Amino acid sequence: MTEQEFLEFWRNYQWTDSAPVHYRLYYDDAGLPLFYSHEDLPGKYVDVTPEQFALQVRSVKVVDGKLVRQRTARMTKLVPADSGTLCHVQDVTVMVADQPGKCWKKKENVIETN
Amino acid sequence: MAQNSESVDYVACACQLARSIRHFHPDAEICLLSDIDAPNSDLFNHHQNFTYPLSENPYANDWQAFGSSPFRQTIKLEADMIIASEIDHWWTMLEHRDVVVSTGARDFYDQPATSRFYRKVFDANNLPDVYNAITYWRLSPTAQQFFQLVRKIFENWAQYKTLLKFPDEIPSTDLVYAMAAQIMGPEHVTLPFVSYPRIVHMKRGIIPIRSDDWTQEITWESNPLRINTVAQWGAVHYHQKGWRYD
């Protein structure tokens, strides 16, 4: 290729538009994350920063079009149960052994603390 | 008073409230004001529908309680509450007044709520710290004037909100009651120095919990109602509308 041919090619070649790079988090109807993707796919999505994309954090939720970090904690509480510690019918702080009572046991709940 | 929304069955809450009142006061006269036909329940002595067309903002229908009550003296209770003890002594104090809107809230340890998280607009505007969840009135010109004022504020919120710093776009009943109380004179419609009636508020900003749903974190017992082993008295505003006591 001569220099003249190269310059002619350079001037006349129709360059294709470069596809924009997407940084997206697709999410479901509840706002919970489905997947991060560079692709333009059907479904709900929110644009994220390249840094957020790189981290691919799953403990997030989309609220009003914004990414909200989901903070959770495990809490243990007493709940009535068929088995467990027998307590006074009207007072969980009083344990009984030889009279009608109500059983209580520990239950762990995962709660959102946002 | 119960007006169902898309997500909350306030009539079910009202039935639960009526049941808790009946537990301590079997002969109490209870009226349900709602926008549905009479529920299949013998908990209520009376059932009234809203007389006037309903506003889009469900709070804005509150003023209709005054005209709908079949009683000479009425205590209006918000539907999402439980009565945890006898409350007939309320009448003894309230009957000396024309209107009393409860002031202040407390946590389930029976300590006055000091958090102002939900009351910023009240503080910014020096409004009385009222909670419409418990409102008493007797048939009187004062009560009529109060509820007319409540109606007027709701229906002309665009004008009234210009009187406030940092107003809400959609007014809450508490805020409108506070404005009405301020206009009429808090000394006529509140008893700020009494310790009852005062609701137990179970919102996250008031009690020591980490999420919005206290029922996931705190142990509670029924009959009698104890929260975190502390026996409750008076009115408990449980806030989690789906919570069922029994």
Image (tube, rainbow, N blue to C red):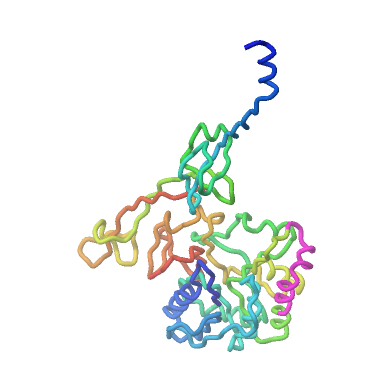
Q: Position of residue B142 (x, y in %)?
A: 72, 82
Main secondary-structure element of the magenta-colored stretch = helix
Please say if A112 is above or below A13. below
Q: Pinpoint residue B157: horizontal percent, then vertical percent.
A: 74, 68
Magenta range: B148-166
Q: Residue B151: say if magenta.
A: yes
Q: Residue furthest top?
A: A2
Q: Does B61 sit left or right of A39 as displayed? A: right
In this image, A84 relative to A45: left or right? left
Q: Residue at x 65, y 66 (%)?
A: B172
State the residue in front, A15 or B229: A15
Does B110 lie within the magenta span? no
Viewer-proximal residue among B20 and B44: B44
Identify the residue at horizontal 34%, vertical 63% (top origin). Answer: A91
Quadrant where the image shows the N terminus of chain A: top right
Q: Residue at x 54, y 70 (%)?
A: B5
**Where does the image place residue B182, in percent across and percent down from the top left?**
74, 69
Percent coordinates x, y for residue B105 in the rendering = 58, 63
Q: In the picture shown, does residue B192 fall above or below A4?
A: below
Res. A103 image quadrant: bottom left
- Give the left or right position of residue B155, taking residue B219 as reference: right
Q: Is residue B214 above or below residue A69?
A: below
Total numbered circles: 0
At 66% from the left edge and 15% from the top edge, which residue is drawn?
A: A6
Q: Left or right: B41 with respect to B56?
A: left
- Position above or below: B87 against B198: below
